Image: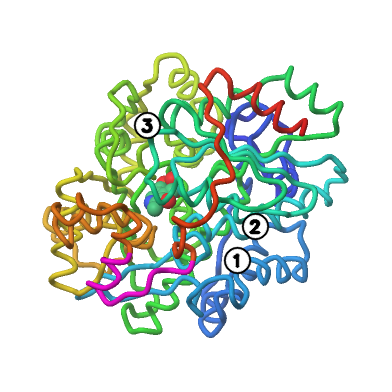
Amino acid sequence: MRYISTRGQVAPVTSAEAIKLGIAPDGGLFVPWEGVNLSQDEFALMRSMSYQERAVAILEKFLTDFTVDELKAHVEAAYGPGKFDHPDVAPVRLIHDNVYALELWHGPTCAFKDMALQLLPHLLTASTRKTGEDAHIAVLVATSGDTGKAALEGFRDVPGTSIIVFYPAEGVSLVQERQMVTQEGGNVHVVAVEGNFDDAQNGVKNIFQDQGIKEVLEKRKIKFSSANSINWGRLVPQIVYYISAYLDLAKMNGVKTGQPVNVVVPTGNFGNILAAFYAKQMGLPVNKLICAANANNVLTDFIRTGVYDRNRPFMKTISPSMDILISSNLERLLWEIAGRDPEPVRGWMRQLQETGRYQVGFEVLKKIQGTFWSDWANDQETLATIRSTYDACGYLLDTHTAVAVKVYHRYRKETGDDTPTLIASTASPFKFAGSVAEAILGPDVASRHDEFSLLRLLAEKCGLAIPRGLQGLENKPVRHRLKVSPGEMASTVLKLLAE
Ligand SMILES: *Cc1c(COP(=O)(O)O)cnc(C)c1O
């Protein structure tokens, strides 16, 4: 299996090279050149497998330059006993009727990013060795909150790597920030950026494309890589859980074998929902992919009108991991939908870069709408959904998953479609305890306590345990205090890597 760039100006590479490079040298994203299918027999065989075994069976299809034994070892290191606090790794739970939560937050940092970022460091260091590279790998990450901590946990003390995480100073929750600035490990750096997520992400993208920095670091035998969701090694582990969830749903009699499901995904950078799209391409019976956005509803507008326009105010919401106006992974979908033709993709991405806007043609839009449906929810609706779902079903949603549930209710009302539905549950409600407590305990209680006390109050009220990764955060020593402007990001990287 070879990988090519969505912009079409790079010779095909192996999966190890694609993972090592992160972003393609022409600025595009690596995509698998051939289609990957799962046969009926393969689906049937996977039914009785553990999550780990299913992961190996699926990764094997995409990462053909890894041996099965290598993949088994990496999967064991990522999802083996003790890593996740649930034996099924990504369990499926009934919310009501035929609506199920696919809980993706049982990993060490309590958000779905762990599903990919526990595995990526192993894939990345193995890829480096496989391609005969002996340079030190410096991983740069821009985070809207959850990626940063998950990447830090994934890479901490992994030999041959360093990691630098940039987060928007005003754009993450108190718990998220505390999780990052208390990070332990000898190869980790955490830096606040004055600006929003897009500023941080653009800063990282610019550093990746800066030849000057690259040359300086090459002399020191250091090479950049990315752990952002543009890296193929991030995306491929995410395909696994959609397929695994379907098999679990069949076991729970939630679907008959072959019966389609809808998948609802609270979306930011378009990575998670794109993985569901790839699962569908492989033959998973998916009816609609429902893209749920918050007030930064650039994707909803795009899916409805074919116009992608980031020229709009950036909104800070209570679902900060979805506060994104440039959804990088959409480029991979555009490439697939445009008949795997890099020409139009290059044009759209150039327009996006130059004007912040592009419009796809009617044919492309119709194809997108054949698979995708989208709507968005504001903060008030999100809080109301957390409350009503808890009252009606006893199920506690985080703010991101609540956006998905709200949008799903609208979908069902507008279309009447009652296909069994999987809702990607992307964070533990405790990770966003401030807003969740406001919904459940009322704004008065929430305003009288800090986020750490709210964790405890919420646990008491709902009879749930605070996840391990969030216990005792307020007492951990702060180890990272650096704060820079977007313009200082490049020099900061050089400085930190010289240490
Ligand atoms: C990252 C994240 C999202 C958005 O996922 P994308 O793959 O960027 O679309 C949604 N919810 C939570 C909790 C996240 O951490």
Q: Mark 3 points at which residue?
A: 325
Instruction: State the image coordinates of residue 99 (x, y, percent, origin top left).
Output: 25, 70
Label 1, label 2: how far apart the Cα atoms are = 7 Å
Left-right relation of 293 to 387: right
- Asked which secondary structure carries label 3, the reply is loop
Q: Is mark 1 on a helix, strand or loop?
A: helix
In the visual, does 227 lie left or right of 122?
A: left
Foreground residue, 94 or 11?
Answer: 94
* Mark 1 nearby-residue class (10 Å; few <14, some 14–19, many ≥20): many
Q: How crowded is mark 2: few (under 14 residues within 10 Å), some or many (20 or more)?
A: some
Q: Is residue 330 above or below residue 157?
A: above
Q: Do the residues labelled 1 and 2 touch (CB within 8 Å)?
A: yes
As drawn, 481 above or below 215: below
What's drawn in magenta, residue-wise? Answer: 456-468
Give the residue displayed 76% in from the left and 60% down from the top: 66
Question: Quick check: marks 3 and 1 in contact, CB under 8 Å?
Answer: no
What residue type is disc 3 on? Answer: Leu
Query: Can see residue 98?
Result: yes
